[in-house]
Amino acid sequence: MLGILKAQSVVRILPLILCPCLLCESSGDLQKAQDLLAKGSLPEAVTVLRQVVHEDPKNPEAHLSLGTALALQGLRAQALEEIETAIHLAPNSAKAQNQLGVILSRFLETDAARKAFEDALSLEPNFADAHVNLALILAQTGELPLAHQHLDKAIDIYGSTQPAARAYFLRAKVWSAQGDNDNAIVDLEKATKLSSSDADAWFDLSQLKNSKGDLSGALTAAKQVVALNPKDAEAQSWLGRLYLENGGAALAVRHLELARSLGVDDKATLYSLARALRATGKVEESKQVEKQVLEMQQFSTRAGEVLFSASGLNDEGLKLERAGDLPGALDKYHGAVDLDPTGYGFRLNYALALCRMQRWQEGIVQLNEVLKQDPDNADATKALFIAQEEATKKDK
């Protein structure tokens, strides 16, 4: 979930969606490839698209589709080569420029992506998708007023159509980052009206309504999130806490226990569950949960001591690396990870050191572990793409 309230001064932006369905007028083989992409059969789709490109090398749509499929596989260099070929064949194609921007964004090349989106808009000023994509980049770089302008333009172009929902959702995040939660709520209500299946928009709407004291509205929105995705542990926990604040202790217990069964074990959830159990007369069960909360607090204290020691090793590793002793630094980073396996910052340094020593496969394993804990880590994502390409070269 993308919580608006977690960081009012910074917009946490959705990644650009790399859509495989680009083809408007498809030949038989292109349609076959598109169907394969829609099913998630990337290797098979790439095989078909390579054949199409071989047979019709001057077909920009085929190159564009192949580039998109390769990007979905994480093959940066090959993907960009195909997209650039498509642009060479169709230099006035705003769609090709926009897709170049999306792919560059996927590989976190923000400046180049921005230029591609701007080029798309210079070719087609009313290209709504390009306005939204450019707004995402601008928001990531903190240029919120300009991002706002592009989202305004996109919404004006989309009108009251379903694609406008995404633009409203993103503009709500910009409003919130600018300190205007009232307008953010208005846009989220528009987004959910146009696309009632957008769980992220419902979740953010629930949080914002709760922050404004509208508990009933927050509860209604939270119910929508859970109805759309019953296995969303964070949503179950949030709904349970709202029920508790609204006097529905029995319903709170139900959702908070479901959240626990789905893997949530943070202190806020457990503390709320303990309160809800006590309110429903389940005193002994409440005491057991309270005991877990206390144990978590004690564990947190011990974890702080471990973190201090691991940080020391990590600092030593940084000093050794700056001095040119990469093997020595690697040992220190490894030691920090052994002490604190959950410290993704330590693990990232360990992973990067492995990659610098061209131990690509080991680095890939560690980078994937970092991204499990911190999916939005840009440094880990960039390094993973590079490591995967280098490992592929080594295997050939």
Image (cartoon, helix red, strand yellow):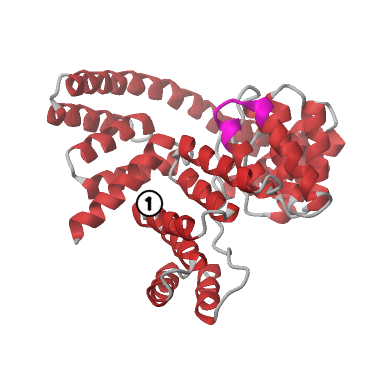
Q: Is residue 195 above or below residue 175?
A: below
Image quadrant assignment for residue 329: top left
The quadrant in which the C terminus is found is bottom left
Q: Amino acid at mark 1?
A: Arg
Depth check: give the residue in front, 288 or 58. Answer: 58
Q: Is residue 226 above or below residue 291?
A: below
Depth check: give the residue in front, 217 or 186. Answer: 186
Q: Is residue 111 visible?
A: yes
- Secondary structure of the residue carrying tag 1 is helix
Image quadrant assignment for residue 180: top right
Left or right side of 363 for 145: right
The quadrant in which the N terminus is found is top right
Badge 1: residue crowd in 10 Å (few <14, some 14–19, many ≥20)? many
Q: Residue at x 33, y 23 (%)?
A: 306
Residue 254 image point, x, y percent: 71, 47
Is residue 292 found inside the magenta-colored segment of the image?
Answer: no
Q: Residue at x 38, y 33 (%)?
A: 344
Q: Residue at x 23, y 34 (%)?
A: 353
- Residue of label 1: 76
What stretch of residues is rendered in magenta? 137-146
Residue 15 image point, x, y percent: 55, 44
Left or right side of 156 for 138: left
Residue 336 image point, x, y percent: 27, 28
Image quadrant assignment for residue 173: top right
Q: Is residue 280 visible?
A: no
